[in-house]
Amino acid sequence: MATTKTRRRQRGSIRPNGAGFQVRVYAGRDPLTKKDLYLHEQAETEVEAEKVRTKLLNQVDEQRHPKREVTLAFLLDRWLGVVELDEDTSYERAEGIIRNYLKPTFGTLKAGKLTAEMLELFYARLRQCQEQCEGQRNGKTDATTKRKHVYEPLAANSIRKIHFILRPALNRGLRWGYVMTNVAALAEPPSQPKPNPDPPTPEEAALVLNTAWQRDLDWGTFLFMTMVTGSRRGEMCALCWSDINFDRLELFVKHSNNGRRIKDTKTHQRRRQAMDVITRNVLLAHRERAEERCKALGGELARDAFVFTAEADSSLPLKPPSVSQRYRRLAERLKIHTHRLKDLRTYNVTELLGNGADVRTVAGRVGHGSNGATTLKYYAAFLATSDRQAVTAFAKQLPVPEGLLTDQPVTTVINGLRLVCECGNESLWAMLVVAEDGAEALCGQCEANVQSRPDAAVGPIGRTIKVEAAPPRELAPWEVIAKDLADAIKDGTMLPGEDVPTVGDIAQAHGVSVGTAHRAFTQLKNDGLIEVSRGRRAVVRPRQEEAADAA
C-alpha cells in the first residue's frame, strides 16, 4: 500500500524582481492600521534568496519564542509591580496612562513585535486626537454619548509621559528577556514645550477673591492663603491648625495630601513661611468659624484639626482634585484667562519677584530646589513694571549730550512740600497719599518710601505740580483711595499711558483689604480715568485732547 505525505506549505515567498529575487516573509499585523506586516529583502541569486528567507524566518521565529510570547500589557503590568515610584500620585498617574492609552492600542500585541515606527505613528495620532479617530469621526455623533465628536489633541507633555513610561518598562523587559531591543529608546517623543508662565493679572486675582468671599468665606480663605503662601494644592489641603504659630507669625509646611493619605511634601522637605498681620487675622476669623461649628456639635476643635475641610468637626481634609475643579468652574464663570489652580502659585512667585524679593528667598518660600532655577524658568512671568524700572535706572547711568533733553525735569510739590526720592526721582510715584500735615509716596523707580513734611524746602527746579489735600469730610476708605489716584491722574502726577499700581500695591500702601482697593480701582475704571485690557496691566487713559491730536 502506497503511503502519501502531506507536504507542509512553505513559509515566505521568493519571486523574480528586476535583476534578482525579492524575499517576503509574513511578520504579523500592525495594531494601529490593522494591516499585515511583511519583511522584505532583495537577493541577487535564487540560492542567496533561500538563505535570506531562512534568516528572515529565524527573525520572525525569535519573536515567537515561548518567553517572548508575552504581550505588552503583561510586560507593563509586571513593570508596574516592581518599579519604585516616589509618590502614590506617580503610581496612579502611570497606571492611568497604561490603562487609558497603552493597553487599548498595544495591549494584545506581542512585546517583541513593537517597533519604533509604531510608537512614533502612535504619538502623531495622539497629537491630532487623543481618541485616534484619524478624522473619521470628527463631527459625527457618538451612538453611546449622543455627542458630536470633536478633535481633542493630547498635549505634548502628556505624550512625553507615555514615552517615559514605555522606555523604562521595555528596558526592564530587555533585562528579563521578553524583548530583543528597547524600541522606545529609538523612538522620538514630541519636544518639550517651552515654559510660558501665565498667572492671572492682579485685577483677575482680586475679582476671584471678591467673588469667593461673597459666596463662601471658607472657600475665599483657601484661595487667599493659596495666593499669599504660593503653596501647592496638596500642601494647603494637608495644613493643620497645629502647623500655624500665630504668636510668631509663622506657618509650617511639612505635609501634603494626595487625595488618599497625608504624606511628605513633593520635595520631601519641610519649610517655614512668614505671615503678615492681615494673613493672621484672616486665619483667626477662619478658626473662629471652625470653632463655632464644633460647638454646635457639642465638641471642641482639635489642635491637629485640618484648616480646610468640608466636615463640621474639621476631621477630614479637602480633596485636591475637588478644589481644582471648583476653582476651574469659578474661573470659567468669571471669564478670566487662566483656569488652573496652579496658576495662583505662579501669581505668588511673579508678584514676589516683581516686588523686589530675591530668587533664593522666593524659591525657599514656595519649596523649589535647584537654587531658584525652577522658580525662574517655570513660575516667574514677565512684569512690564519691573522692566520699566530696570531700564529707567540703567539709562540714568549713561551720559547724554547737553541740549539733547529739551524737556525740563518735573518736580512734585504737594501743599508746598517737595517730594524727592534718594534715587533722584521727583515725578514718578507708584503710590501717593496726601494728608493735611504732609504727604507720603512710594517711588516708582526704586520703590522706596518717600515722606514730605513741613520742614522740607521747595526747590525751584522745573515746573511744579500741586495736589489738593484730602477734604475734611469723612469719606469711605475706598473713596479716599479713588480720589487720591484720580487727583494724581488729573494733575499729571501719573502720566497718560503710565502703569497704574496693582490692587495689591494699593491695598498694602493704604493698609486696607484687597476688596476695598479693588472697589477704588473699579471706580477709576467707571470714571474713564484708566484703561483695563485683558492680560495687561491697567494704564492711565490718554486725555481726550491728546487722543484727538494723535488721531
Image (cartoon, rainbow, N blue to C red):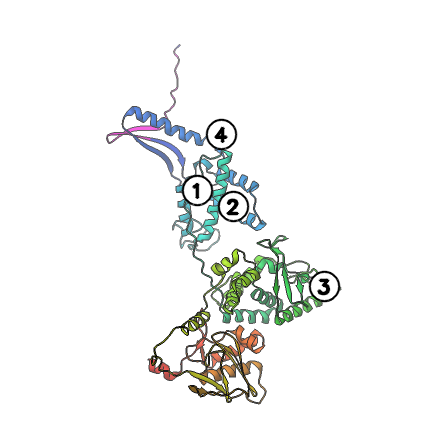
Q: Is residue 344 above or below residue 105?
A: below
Q: Name the residue under label 2.
A: 99
Q: Distance between the residues labelled 1 and 2?
A: 22 Å
- SS class of the residue under badge 2? helix
Q: How far apart are marks 3 and 2 (CA)?
A: 42 Å
Q: Distance between the residues labelled 2 and 4?
A: 25 Å
Image side of residue 43 versus residue 245, left or right: left
Image side of residue 167 versus residue 548, left or right: right
**Mark 2 packing: few (<14 Cα in 10 Å), some, or many (20+)?**
some
**Can you tell which of label 2 and label 4 is closer to the viewer?**
4
Report which quarter residue 52 is drawn in.
top left
- Residue stretch rendered in magenta on the structure: 2-23
Mark closest to the chain's N terminus, 3 or 4:
4
Q: Which dot marks residue 357?
A: none
Outermost residue to the right? 298
In the image, what residue occupies the spot 55% across and 49% down?
90
The three-letter code of the residue at mark 2 reads: Arg
The three-letter code of the residue at mark 4 reads: Pro
**Mark 3 packing: few (<14 Cα in 10 Å), some, or many (20+)?**
many
Nearest the camera: 407 or 510?
A: 407
Mark closest to the chain's N terminus, 1 or 4:
4
Q: Mark 3 points at which residue?
A: 301
Q: Mark 4 points at which residue?
A: 66
- SS class of the residue under badge 3? loop
